[in-house]
Structure formats: structure tokens, C-alpha cells
Amino acid sequence: MAEARLIPQHTEQALRALRDAPMSVPAAREHWKYSKLELARGAITDAPNADAVEIAGVPGALHAMLADSGFCPLTCDLLLREPRIQVLQLTESGRHELKVASAATPTVIQVASGISAEVIDRDQGASAWIICIIEDNATLNYHRLRSTQEVQEWSKLQFVQHRDSEVTLTSFVSAAAFRRHDVSVDLLGANAEFRFDGAAVASARQHIDLQSHVRHQAPHTRSKQRWHTIGQDRATLTYRGRIYIAEQCNGVDAGLTNRNLALGAGVTINTKPELEIYSDDVCCAHGATVGQLDEETLFFLRARGIDERTARRMLAEGFLRETLSGPLADEAAHVLTGSVA
Amino acid sequence: MSDMANTAAHPLLEIDDLHAEVDGKAILKGLSLTVRAGSVHAIMGPNGSGKSTLANVLAGKPGYEVTGGSVRFDGQDLLAMEPEERAHAGLFLAFQYPVEIPGVSNMEFLKTAMEAAAKARQETPLTTAEFMKKLRGTASELDLAADFLKRGVNEGFSGGEKKRNEILQMKLLAPKFALLDETDSGLDIDALAVVGNGVNAFVDEDRTRAVLMITHYQRLLNHIVPDVVHVLADGRIVESGDKQLALTLEERGYAWLKRA
């Protein structure tokens, strides 16, 4: 972990791109299906000294997360002037266990050209704001697990990908009273690839909201996302998956799948895949389903002597397991399937 | 080989005047049938005669309402039991369309099913090593490659592989009674022979067992020779006979029976 001294020119461009295309955060009245801002306040005030936090000289910047315009403008200049921003420059391949110093200020992870890094991001206490910059031909495997239930969280995870870079993100989430995860991906260089596998389980009156926004801004970039959730009791699960393909980005291959299991009549599931495409020669697929356990399959298992409760559990676990991969898969299986009643 | 006249053997399945409906529509209209230990029965019949309904009612599938009659299985009231209790009592339904379960490995599924069976029989379940040995041995008898065990249940399996997987489950769970629902559908000739051998061995190994196979076509009966053939039409058994009856049906179709 090192302080930022020099950030290459194109990284600065990348950060400018973030500023110019900030991840959108819905306004208080934008849409009832997204996280209600009253709920989100807990996630914000739980952060240490939230009211006093300044990001890069912008007073009350964290509260800008709640504003219509999204994040405060972010530039290298600002980053370098602000010592509280943690900049993690990864120049050698290997695994890094991430510790976010402050829930309120962004942590910037820069993966140097040509290296292959792995980041493990376990529960960070509360909210976290992480910006990953993946240089040309670099690989980042980012694995996130959220298992504590006593928190309120609104986390942002942003990837800025340059030419021939690869990112694999896994995110396994056990719900809390309030969790909102924003994932933003900018595929800026040709042939960059982003893959995401994730799963979540929410029970009682828990709330999970995932907003993913993948912007293809160069030709022959690829993205593939899978997000499986299970809701029980009176839980709410919301997903918005947005894929944007800019002009002159032929050869893009993008796909997203969101599948949701509602185990109980009191569960609310909102899902909204969105495509915005300005190039002709692209391949783009999306799909979202909301359903219950398949009765035929349940009967098949019972006809093999497996009692109904065990059969339901097996099917729910199998549904989650389809997305479980990476080094946290076993731990995630334990956490997530443990919370399926 | 036993036959209809062998009334000394233990009656494993006794269906008496069974009436059942689906979505308020009567499908089985007074079906009676007794299958004794050591025998292989076949039920043939045209589409819509109630063949699959019979299989589903016997296995306890939700959505099938029994409106009259009784079914005794090995002396117990079958209709009062949950599907898993029927399995524990020794009834095995080989599905016409085995379901695919992505995310649940075949191995995990088989282990859970065998543990449930052992628990129901009040036996100590196999250790993982014993289970694996048994599983590998049985799978190779059925020409199932090792990777079938690691994949999701029936996930991406061909029709033949799915049916072989059903026979694998049957061999591992060692039921008393196998109910084969259109097991020949989707099978090529090689798979048909493997499945046929599996079913023949099932009864030959243990004469306290029995088989009831439900089929539209005669070709499965070239591989599994029945002791008794029944013809089901409009929810009732309208004709019973020996294996010759199947050949007659193949030759003449079902139309002459309906007129009878």
C-alpha cells in the first residue's frame, strides 16, 4: 500500500471520465423501486464523522452520494491534494487483502500494466467507495463478500479498464437492514473484458439494491454479468443493470442475466435490465426472471425420498451455487445457504 | 418366470377401482391391477388413456386428485403417504422426462437421496468413501462416465444419459418396486439395451421385487420381457394377457380395442 506520487496521464483521463459520467444515484423521488433515501441515511450516518467528512476539499462530499448529480467531481489533482484518500498501487502480481481506512473517502486501486492482481474485499464495517483503475493488459480479480447483518451499507465500486485488461468480479452478499451496491464499469480500451458473478440472500425485512452500469466505450470490449438472488419473508431485492454501448464500438459482446427466487408471498423483487446501444455491429443479450422453486423439480427430489424441506433447501442452494466461483466461493456458500430457511 | 396364475407370490402393488382426476377432469375411471413380487408387468395404451396419470398418482405428484378406490403397497395404504414416504417404502418412479437441476451436482443429489433412504430404513448411512466406491462401480456398469457424477443433475445430458441416470438412481436406492414411465422415449438402441439390462437385473437379482412399465410402444418389450401385458384405454384396464398381446397391439393398433 503506497501513497500516490505519480499517476499516469491516461489514468487522469480515466478519472476525468468518471467525473464526466458519474454513476447516477437516484433522487429522492426518482422511483420508488430503488432504495428509498430515508433508508439510506442510516448507511451514511453510520460512517465515522459523516457530516464532517470532506472528500478532496469538497465539504460534505459524502452527502453528494445522495444528490441528483451523484459523486462529486473527481480528478487526479483532487486526489493528490487529499491525503485521506487511500491510493493502492499494485505493481506486482499477487493477492491483496483490502482494508478500507475510511468508509467515507474513496480508495483508489491502481493495477499496473501487465500484472495480474487479486483483491479480497471482506466486510469493511460499513460503506466503502472503491475505484479500480486497470492499466493496459492488466488483470484484476476482485472478490467481495458481505456477511455481517448488523450494518447499513451504501458502497460504490468502480472499474476503469484500459486496453486488453480483464476484470473478474465476484460479489456475494448476505443482506442487512439496508445494503445498496453500485457497480460502475468503464471499458475505455479496446478488447477490455469485464465479468461479474454475484448472489445475494435477503430475509426478514432486509433490503438489497444492486445497480450495475457497464459502459462500453471502445470496440471489441466484452462484458458478462450474472446476479442471482433469493428473497424470503418480507425482504426487498432491487436490481438495475444498465449496459451502454457508445458509437463506433463495433464488435462489442455484452450480456447480463438476473434471476430471482421469491420464497414467500411477502417478498418484493424489482428488476430492470436496460440497454442503450449506439453501434450497429454488436452482440447484446439480457434477461431477467422472477420465480419460485420449480414444482416438477421439487417432486422429482421428493420422489427420490428427499423430504420437502431438504429438497427446497437443495434447490435454493443449487440456484445460488450456479454463480459461486472464485476464492470466496466456499465461504460464500456457507454464509448464503446458511441464511436460506 | 411367474405369470398371472402365480397367485402365491406376495402382492406388492394392489390397485382397486382407482378413480383420479386432474383439473376436475376424470382420467382414471375404475382401474384395478395387482402386481406380485417377482413379476414384470407392462401397461400399454394410446395417448390420453391415463398411463402417465397412473404413474403420477402412484408416486404422489401434487395436482392429481384421487376421487375413489384404493392402492395398497406392500400392505400399506399408499395414497395416505407423502411422495418421500412412498420412496422410503420402496416405490421408485423412473420419470418420463427427468428434470435438470443446475447447481445441484448429481453426486450430491445421489448422496442425499441415499442418506434419506438409509435414515428411513434405520440403517447407518454409508461413509463418503463407501458411497463413492458404490457410486463409481454402479455408474461404470451403466457406461456413465465419471464426469456425469460431478455435473448438475441431468444438466445438459442427452435423452439416453438422463434415462441411464434414472437407472443409476434405481440401482443405488434399491427399491422394491420400479415404476417405469415411458422409459423408452428418447432412447437410442444402445441406451435401450443398457436400460433393459438394468431393469432385468433388478428383478432377477431379487425375486421379492417387481416392475410395472408404462409404454406406448412395443419396442421396450423386446428388451424387458413382461410376464403380463395390460391395455389401458379411457382410464381402465380393458385387456390383459401375456407378451403376445403386445405383439398383437403392435400389429393391429389400439383401435380394435376401443370398439370392443
Image (cartoon, coloured by chain):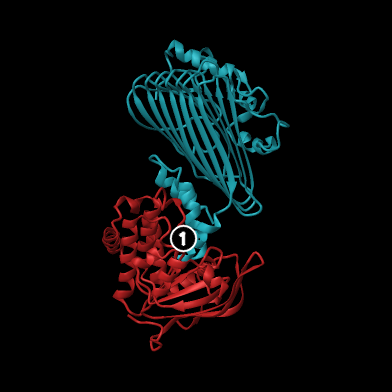
Chain colours: A cyan, B red
Q: Residue at x 36, y 70 (%)?
A: B174
In which quadrant of the rendered image does the C terminus of chain B lie?
bottom right
**B144 sits left or right of A58 in the view:** left
Residue B119 in sight here: yes
Query: Looking at the picture, does residue B252 appear above or below residue A316?
Result: below
State which chain disc 1 sits on: B
The x, y position of residue A22, in whole percent, is 59, 21
Direction bottom: furthest residue: B8
Label 1, secondary structure: give it.
loop
Q: Residue at x 33, y 71 (%)?
A: B202
The x, y position of residue B166, in whole percent, is 39, 61
Q: Residue A168: name its quadrant.
A: top left
Front-lying residue, B152 or B216: B216
Direction right: furthest residue: A29
Residue A56 in sight here: no
Front-lying residue, B245 or B99: B245
Crowd class of label 1 (few under 14; some 14 to 19; many from 20; radius 10 Å): many
The x, y position of residue A211, in whole percent, is 58, 33
Q: Residue B42: name its quadrant.
A: bottom left
Q: Which kind of residue does numbered mark 1 sit on? A: Gln
In which quadrant of the rendered image does the N terminus of chain B lie?
bottom left
**A226 sits left or right of B41 in the view:** right
Direction top: furthest residue: A9
**B192 sits left or right of A151 in the view:** left
What residue did someone put label 1 on? Answer: B96
The x, y position of residue A184, in whole percent, is 53, 27
Q: Residue at x 60, y 72 (%)?
A: B20
Query: Looking at the picture, does residue B40 appear above or below residue A91?
Result: below
